[in-house]
Image (cartoon, rainbow, N blue to C red):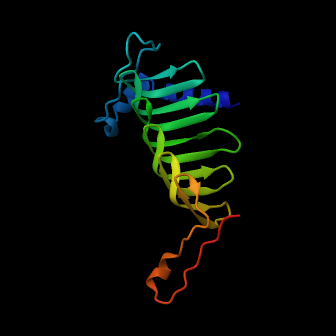
Amino acid sequence: MRSSLISILLAIVTFSSTSSWANEISKTEYFTSIKSLPICRFVYNSVEPWHECYGLHDYGNGNKYFGDWVHNRPEGWGIRIDEEFSFFHIGQFFNGEENGYGLSGYLSEHSSFYLGTYEQGNREGWFTIFSSDGTKSVGQFVDDERHGIWLKTNAEGKEYLYEYKRGEQVFPPIIYKAQCFQIEGCMPKLYPRAP
């Protein structure tokens, strides 16, 4: 099921990016200033490099990449799929690694999707995590680990704040409502901890 879903996704992307479609789109007034990269040769090999083109490469181990190539590496916008682990990443690449804005996750029943910024293949900066159980978490990653204050909203809309330090959750988090700091004599109220 997952491999057929991945195959369908790759087919849609491949057919929608054919040169005839690109030529028709480029004739419209909105797209006249956009220059698309040429399509890479059909078969990837290490003798003749893929440079400043876009194409689909099957690594043979369940990994596939479709997108921009520079100096034989994924660079620019692309899609990377790992069929063995049902993992995907859609976004920006640099030097063959996720770098810049992106969406990644696992295609499974109990999966999470990560939307944010990447640096050299690691999550770095602000992220929103969407989980299959309906929860949404917003916070920051440092060196691919949760760090700082995270806001988790469950499916019913209840909000909980968590504090992380280099991937480890801090117990108990001492987080106060911001309004209380501005009112003299106000007793700060702790946010409830999620069950």
Q: Residue furthest left?
A: 33
| Foreground residue among 26 and 107 | 107
In the displayed structure image, the side of residue 80 where residue 94 appears, left or right: left
Residue 28 at x, y = what percent? Answer: 34, 35
| Foreground residue among 18 and 192 | 192
Q: Residue at x 67, y 64 (%)?
A: 194
Quarter occupied by residue 54: top left
Q: Residue furthest top?
A: 47
Q: Residue at x 47, y 37 (%)?
A: 121
Q: Residue furthest bottom?
A: 185
Q: How many marks?
A: 0
Residue 6 at x, y = what percent? Answer: 61, 30
Residue 62 at x, y = what percent? Answer: 60, 23
Quarter occupied by residue 25: top left
Residue 101 at x, y = what percent? Answer: 43, 44
Picture quarter with the N terminus: top right
Picture quarter with the C terminus: bottom right
Q: Residue at x 54, y 25 (%)?
A: 64
| Foreground residue among 102 and 166 | 166
